Amino acid sequence: MFPAPLHFQSLELSCCSLNITTMAALAMGLRHSNITSLTLDNTNIDVAILPSLLDALLDTNLRRLRLSMTSLDNDACALIAAALPSLTIVELNLSYNELTDRSAKVVSEVVGRATSLTSLVLSDNDIDLEGATALVKALSERPQVTTWLDLGWNRINLDGADCLYDMVEKTPQILKASFAQWGE
């Protein structure tokens, strides 16, 4: 279905119905490919095939991974987080999923070792102040600069957002962040 390795730098398969067989073929095609950008937005990703996909990405120079609106849960996020330190991803977008504080904390535990990651988008999930605080602290403590952190439209109230903005303002390690909520 997909030739291995794929010979293009960017692949967008948004709003698709990819079954397990197709995802397995995609993972095989991605292995040792030249891909730098992969977008699978609005595509249901079976957590059973996610390890194969992530394993294939270890053999690439992928810089941008967008998995927005893919119904990812905390277990899927834990798999992605575990792979992050071994990947070359600069920009990770997991917005509009089903991620909670558990996901935010798991990501916060690995961002210090994910040296290429500079942009993290976790907007429109179910993360509250505790998870957001853990992420801001972890990103503040690593030597790499985060150019963009988006935790907008999560379960963070206005006072919590103000606290997070204060934390970001006090660190040179996060250049820009959003904790915006509806009505702000």
Image (spheres, rainbow, N blue to C red):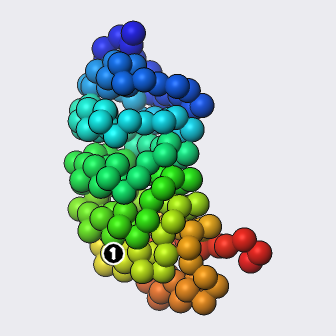
Nearest the eye: 11 or 95: 95
Q: Residue at x 44, y 48 (%)?
A: 72
Quadrant of the image for the N terminus? top left
Q: Residue at x 49, y 46 (%)?
A: 71
**Residue assigned mark 1:** 138
| Residue appearing at x 26%, y 68% in the figure | 109
Whether residue 64 is visible: no
Residue at left offset 29%, top offset 36%: 48
Which quarter of the rendering shows the C terminus? Answer: bottom right
Q: Secondary structure at mark 1?
A: helix
Horizontally, residue 58 falls left or right of residue 149, namely: left
Residue 47 appears anywhere in the view: yes
**Compared with residue 143, is residue 79 higher up or lower down, i.e. above or below?**
above
Residue 158 percent coordinates (x, y): 64, 85
Name the one closer to the observer, 178 or 71. 71
Disc 1 crowd, CA 10 A, few/some/many (<14, 14-19, 20+): some
Which amino acid type corresponds to the residue marked 1 in the rendered image?
Answer: Ala
Where 171 sits versus 27, above or below?
A: below
Q: Quadrant of residue 107?
A: bottom left
Residue 70's x, y, as percent? 50, 42
User: Does residue 141 appear left or right of residue 124 in this picture?
Assistant: left
User: Residue 103 falls in which quadrant of the image?
Assistant: bottom left
Residue at the far right in the pictured view: 183
Above/below status of 118 relative to 57: below
The one nearer the camera, 151 or 103, is 103
Count of numbered labels shown in the rendering:
1
- Residue 34's quadrant in the figure? top left
Residue 8 x %, y %: 44, 21
